[in-house]
Image: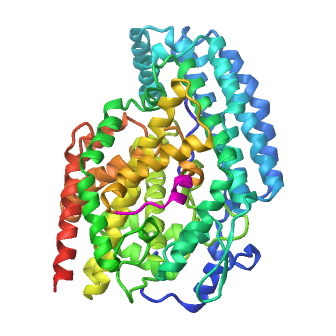
Amino acid sequence: MHFFPPMTLSFLGLLLAAANSSLSQERDRSKIPQQYQWNLADIYPRDDVWKKAKEQLVAEIPNIERYRGMLSQAAEQLLGCLDLVNRLAKEYTRLNSYARMHSDQDTRDSKYLAMDQEIRQIGATLGAAEAFVEPEILKLDRAIVESFLKKETKLEIYRHYLDDILRRQAHTGTEGEEKIIADASLMADSAQSIFGIFSNAEFPYPEVTLSDGKKVKLDQAAFSMYRAVPNRDDRKKVFAAFFETLNEYRRTFGVQLYANLKKDMFYMKARKYPSCLQSALDANNIPVQVYHSLVGNVNANLSTFHRYLKLRKRMLAVDELHYYDLYAPLVNGVDLKYSIEEAQKNILASLAPLGREYIAVTQRAFSERWVDVYPSQGKRSGAYSDGSVYDVHPYMLLNYNGKYDDMSTLAHELGHTMHSYLSNKNQPYPNASYPIFVAEVASTFNEALLIDHMLKTIKDEHVRLSLLGSYLEGIKGTVFRQTQFAEFELRLHEKAEKGEALTGDALNALYDELTKKYYGHDKGICRVGDEIKSEWSFIPHFYYNFYVYQYATAFTASAALSEQVLGGDQAATRRYIEFLSSGSSDYPINLLKKAGVDMTSSQPFELTMKKMNRVMDEMEKILDK
């Protein structure tokens, strides 16, 4: 059964208040005020309560066995089994989220790492205990399933789940095979877990001395901040130090990533799929053509991306654009900074088109400590929203540095949070966890609303140039960069499936080839330095099994949907809120069609490219003045 929702990853006012500026740099968690830390006590008030709930879950798992061989006997038996498994799965995800988020706030803390590992083992036990369920359901004729649904109305909440099982009939094994697959989950996350601990807690990140004499330790949060400094020599130094240090460990990172590929191939073969791509996409009934079309469309439109890179070169006034120039502020003298309070105010104003309820819940997220705001020592890097605690509320992890990008990231994660909140509120637990394919629609939709609001409120042309540039950078990072990652991931799996060796050096070579193609290195568009070849090694999404392409497809979907909502179409707004409230009640392609966008066509991508060119037209008009 597939009741365990994945963690949603993976993923910033013109003046920053002095107090919050210091907070954003405070790395000692004990000195960060509680109002800027999430309150995990809403899940379990204390660790001993967590332990008691864990023990109760373990005690109840054997109860599943009484339904073995009984699912075909009566609708009541099928309902009882599904209700029990879902109730235990819901408690498992709650236990898992508590342990994992505690571990994420300080990855050096072995206590919570141990709790996380312990509950994952229990999850494997739970998966093994209910391994007979899907094979038994598969033995039922569709007509029998339909008769059960008519006889027992409470089974209706499982209709989509049952339909999905029967759809995947050819890829579900016997009871014994399913148990082996479930037991394999004990090993399945090893590569990802090792990568997470190594890169967040133990990797020897380098120190650099900047032009002002300041020494900076370049962990991932600091790299994200200092790669965007105005001083070009500093940027060059930051990129060189960070990626050259990563390259020294390419063998270790290579072995970790190859181990993850082998895990994907195990599940591909166990589930009888011809490729890892088909194995991954079929989980949500996504045609593989959607993936191939994305890669093909982006490669066919690299000239539009190169137009953006030429525009960036013009705005930076450099003779030659380099990879280390890609995050530099586009407009001199405009360093957009926002305190967390200013960011919250701007975001709330931008979300007004979505209605009062949406705004009210967002305010709760800010005031009721759903968000862990600032970076601290040992804290997991990046940002995410976790909406898997069904009976509580979603949580957000940030590493807020006070930049516009940080404000945009907050809006992004709030999109996930509202998606989870509305689905949890409006759907029963079996249908609450929305498909991964639609996960990034709500997040990038919020980013579009934020930048639209900022452009409406700011008239200064230098600032507008910066914001328009930020929008282009969003397309660069979400459509082009993520598709580059998607092509890299596809090529990796294809090589592994053919039995080709994938050492750190081989991974470097492939990444270097693709990066130079995307950024027009050989055409003189953007020079990609030799050190960039190791960038793949710190991208956590390569451990998420064909996840990244969905950032790009979701961005194009949200671009189409947000244009309708910003145009004042109330029916479109209503459809969008219904989409956010739908969870997994239907297949993702169908959910998006109901919302008003067809992802099997090229239209969403074409609309995104047209909007990108319109933005560049406006920027060039301002520059020509």
Q: Is residue 192 magenta?
A: no
Q: Is residue 96 visible?
A: no
| As drawn, 224 above or below 466 | above
Front position in the image: 495 or 320: 320
Taking the image as shown, residue 200 lies to the left or right of residue 488, namely right
Residue 394 located left or right of residue 316 = right
Verify whether residue 530 appears in magenta. yes
Quarter occupied by residue 32: bottom right
Q: Quadrant of the N terminus?
A: top right
**In this picture, which residue range is highlighted in magenta?**
526-535
* Residue 607: % across, % down: 20, 53
* Image position, residue 204 (x, y; %): 73, 62
Q: Is residue 221 above or below residue 603?
A: below
Question: Within the image, what quadrant is residue 325 found in?
Answer: bottom left
Magenta span dominant secondary structure: helix
Q: Nearer the viewer, residue 458 or 216?
A: 216
